[in-house]
Image: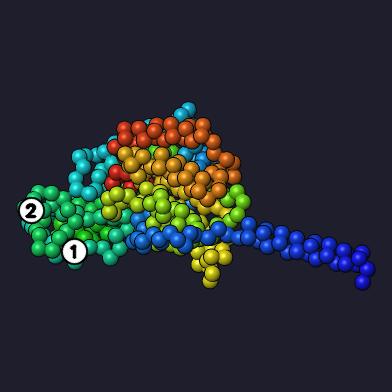
């Protein structure tokens, strides 16, 4: 074997080794990032059941959207807001509120027991897509409350919600409400008094118009710059910021301080990746951080926390924060969104529908 042959053989071996090494390095570089096994795993938390699973987007002009599905408003201070919000027909009583409910009072000749009232409740507490509620005037406390066994009531009221995210109460739903309320009244020997249907349906449309124009649901998208992420890697980094597992695979939530309230933020990624036979090999290249504005009180500073969480995850996971169209979100854009949100909060406050309040959570649901 000549020296030239030996040199060529050595050179070929080196080239082959270089190719194998490069491929191995690229494979390692592009493999989904894994969680740090030295870090103790975050404790399991109760799954979130208070939020629906919509993935909101950042800006959509409701005037350009057709159909009954509600979308978020375009944050534009110059956009005229509807001013024909229905005026409450009376003082708030119990859980039902004339601002967002049709209320049918039921008078009684005497007293009715809570047990009888519960037995007479409608089989389903909905009229179409609108919640129906029944309350009684407690003989002893003088307050309106859901019927309780062992208590006695001097009057009842049945209510149906005027609007929610499925749209306004319509004539068919109102008629279904009347049937349910009349059946309940007959069972407790009461006499109901129903508001005029056309007036209430008109009120519902006006309330729905206001709610549609002020229903803000925001989302930031965090995209991987280089290597993808494994589900465990995402969960570990999100857990450091206080996120806990949600009910659906691929969803985490930042819970509210008070038990039972909707979560402050949601974080979601590909459900199929979370359900894979070997999640460690699943490649996630983007995740969504979302905020349902009317569901969370402004005192929680949800947008600031959303912004901080997105920045922290981008820094730790080598990602970039964008809108749903893939456009990077600069600090100036974030500032504009924050200012517009403050105006939205002020508008909701002025209408007695403050973000995070029971009425706002019911209306924007």
Percent x, y of residue 267: 45, 52
Q: Residues within 10 Å of mark 2 (few under 14, many from 20)?
A: some
Q: Is residue 170 left or right of residue 178?
A: right
Q: Quadrant of residue 329?
A: top right
Q: Quadrant of residue 281?
A: bottom right
Seen at 31% across and 32% down, the residue is 350
Seen at 61% across and 60% down, the residue is 31
Q: Residues within 10 Å of mark 1 (few under 14, many from 20)?
A: some
The total number of labels drawn is 2
Percent x, y of residue 123: 28, 65
Q: Which residue is mark 2?
A: 139
Q: Nearer the viewer, residue 267 or 50?
A: 267
Q: Which residue is mark 1?
A: 118
N-terminal-most mark, 1 or 2: 1
Percent x, y of residue 195: 26, 46
Secondary structure of the residue carrying numbered label 1:
helix
Q: Nearer the viewer, residue 63 or 342?
A: 342
Percent x, y of residue 295: 36, 46
């Amino acid at each position: 074997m000549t020296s030239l042959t030996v040199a060529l053989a050595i050179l070929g071996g080196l080239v082959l080794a270089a190719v194998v090494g490069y491929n191995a390095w690229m494979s390692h570089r592009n493999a989904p990032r894994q969680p740090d096994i030295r870090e103790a795993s975050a404790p399991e938390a109760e799954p979130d059941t208070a939020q629906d699973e919509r993935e909101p987007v950042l800006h959509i002009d409701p005037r350009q959207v057709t159909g009954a599905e509600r979308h978020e408003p375009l944050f534009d201070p110059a956009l005229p807001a509807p001013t024909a919000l229905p005026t409450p027909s009376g003082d708030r009583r119990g859980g039902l509120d004339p601002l967002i409910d049709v209320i049918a009072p039921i008078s009684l000749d005497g007293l009715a027991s809570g047990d009888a009232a519960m037995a007479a409740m409608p089989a389903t507490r909905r009229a179409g897509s609108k919640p129906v509620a029944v309350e009684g005037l407690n003989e002893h406390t003088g307050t309106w409350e859901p019927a309780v066994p062992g208590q006695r009531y001097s009057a009842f009221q049945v209510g149906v919600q005027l609007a929610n995210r499925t749209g306004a109460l319509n004539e068919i739903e109102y008629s279904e409400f009347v049937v349910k309320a009349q059946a309940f009244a007959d069972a407790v020997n009461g006499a109901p008094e129903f508001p005029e249907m056309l007036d209430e349906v008109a009120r519902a449309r006006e309330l729905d118009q206001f709610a549609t124009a002020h229903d803000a649901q925001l989302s930031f998208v965090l995209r991987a710059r280089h290597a993808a992420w494994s589900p465990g890697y995402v969960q570990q980094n999100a857990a450091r910021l206080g996120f806990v597992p949600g009910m659906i695979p691929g969803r985490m939530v930042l819970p509210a301080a008070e038990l039972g309230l909707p979560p402050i933020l949601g974080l979601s990624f590909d459900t199929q990746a979370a359900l894979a036979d070997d999640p460690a090999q699943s490649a996630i290249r983007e995740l969504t951080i979302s905020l349902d504005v009317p569901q969370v009180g402004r005192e929680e500073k949800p947008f600031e926390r959303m912004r901080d969480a997105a920045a922290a995850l981008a820094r730790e996971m080598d990602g970039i924060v964008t809108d749903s169209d893939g456009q990077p979100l600069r600090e100036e854009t974030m500032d504009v969104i924050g200012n517009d949100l403050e105006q939205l909060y002020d508008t909701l406050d002025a209408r007695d529908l403050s973000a995070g309040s029971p009425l706002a959570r019911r209306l924007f649901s």
